[in-house]
Image (cartoon, rainbow, N blue to C red):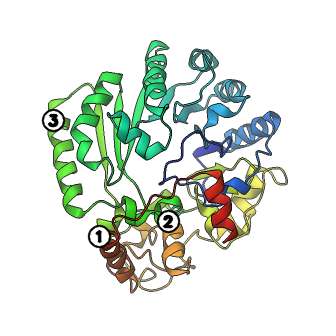
Amino acid sequence: MNNEIKPPLWILLELTHKCPLECAYCYNQLDFAKTKDAMSKEDWFRVMEQAREMGAVQLGISGGEPLLNKDVVEIVKKANDLKFYTNLITSGVGAPKGVVAKLKVAGLKTVQLGVQSHDKDTMTLITNNKNSYDEKIAFAKEVKDAGLQLIVNTCITRQNIHQVGEIIEFAEKLGANYLEIANIQYYGWALKNVNALLPSQEQISVARAVTNHYRNERKDMKVFFVVPDYFATRPKACMNGLGTTFLTINPDGIALPCNTANTLPLEFPNVKEFSVEEIWNESESFNYFRGDKWMKEPCRTCDEKEKDFGGCRCQAYALTGDMNATDPVCIKSPNHGIINKKIEDSVIHSDDKIIYRNRLNSLNLSNS
Ligand code: FES
C-alpha cells in the first residue's frame, strides 16, 4: 500500500437510485435513470470487507431509497459483523413493513430521516408524493420505538425556509436526537432548478436567527444549520478534499470520491473489476485531485488552499466547464460573477416551474 495515501474513513453504499420521492434538489446525477442496480449482495459484502480492511470505520447506506433494496437487512448485518458504525439515510417512504425492527436487530445504529416540512402540503409540494407526510411520521415512530438514534435532516429551499421554527418544533415532537437544517447546495437536480429553489440572502439570515433562538431554548435536541455556499465568500472544503476521506459506491458498482463525481470528465473504476484498495490507491481518477498539482491560480498560491482545497470540484466543473478551476463561490475566483448572476436570475425567474427528479425527466434530460 502507498504509505502517503491515507485510507478512506467514510464509505457510502448507494444501494439503488430508485426512489418514491421526486425532490428537485436530489444530488443523484441527472441521468440517474440510466444507472443499473448491478451489485449483488455478495458484491456489497466484498466491498465492505475490503474497505474495512483498509481502515474505514463509518458506513452510510443510502440511495435513492436504500430500503427498496431487498438485501438491506443482510447488508446492515454484515456491516455490523465487520464492526462498522452504520447509518441509514432514508426517505422513510415505501419501506417494507417491520423493516426498522429488523434493522435494529441487524445492528443499525442511526437513522437519518429526510423531513421536508411540518406541513403536509409543503411536504407534498417538495417531494411530489402525497403519501410522504404520513409515511414519514409513521416511520419516525418506528425508529424511536426500536430505540434507534434519529437524525432528522431538512433540506432547505425557498419552499420551506419560512417554516424553520415550526420544523424545529416538529422534529422535536418526532423525537429527533439531532436536526440538520441543511440549505441545499446547487449541483445536479438542484442546479437545474436553481431559479425555483434558491432563497434570498435575507431569508437565510432570518432562518439562521430563528435557528439560533431555538438552539438556545432547546437542550435535548442538537440543531445544526448548514449555510448555502452561494452566499459565502470562501468555498467549502468539499469532501475534505477529494480522495482523502470519503468513498461512494454507486448501484452499478462505480466507485467515486464524492457522491456526484461521476459528473466530472474522468473515468471512474468499478468495484466489480478492481479491489477497493486498487481503486483508492492506484486509480488515476482517485489520484487526480490529491495534492495541489492540479490547481490553477488563484488556488495554487492561495494561503487557504490547505483549508478549502480550492472548493467543490463538481461545482467548479458544472459552472465553468473546467474541473481544475477555483470554485466560483470563492470571491477570489475570476468566475465569481457566475454565482452573482445565478442569484440575480433566481429573482428574475423565481416563478420557473420545478423539474422533479423522476425517471422520465432523467431520461429526457440525459437525451437532450
Ligand atoms: Fe463533488 Fe463537491 S460535490 S467535490
In primary-sequence order, the first of circles 2 and 3 is 2
Q: CA distance from mark 2 to mark 1?
A: 15 Å
The residue identified by callout 1 is 347
Q: Secondary structure at mark 1?
A: helix
Contact, mark 2 vs mark 3 (Cβ under 8 Å)? no
Q: What is the quadrant of residue 84 in the picture?
A: top right
Q: Residue furthest right?
A: 273
Q: Amino acid at mark 3?
A: Asn
Residue located 68% across and 29% down the image: 72
Point out the frontmost of discs 2 and 3. Answer: 2
Residue 75, how many percent across, how many down? 70, 29
Q: What is the quadrant of residue 365 in the picture?
A: bottom right
Residue located 32% across and 54% down the image: 158
Residue 53 relative to residue 181: left or right: right
What crowding class fits label 1: few (fewer than 14 Cα within 10 Å), some (14-19), or many (20 or more)?
some
Q: Secondary structure at mark 2?
A: helix
Name above or below for residue 182 compared with residue 68.
below
The residue identified by callout 3 is 216
Q: Nearer the viewer, residue 368 or 38?
A: 368
Residue 27, how many percent across, how many down? 53, 55
Q: Amino acid at mark 1?
A: Val
Point out the frontmost of discs 1 and 3. Answer: 1
Name above or below for residue 284 compared with residue 44.
below
The residue identified by callout 2 is 192
Contact, mark 2 vs mark 1 (Cβ under 8 Å)? no
Q: CA distance from mark 1 to mark 3?
A: 33 Å
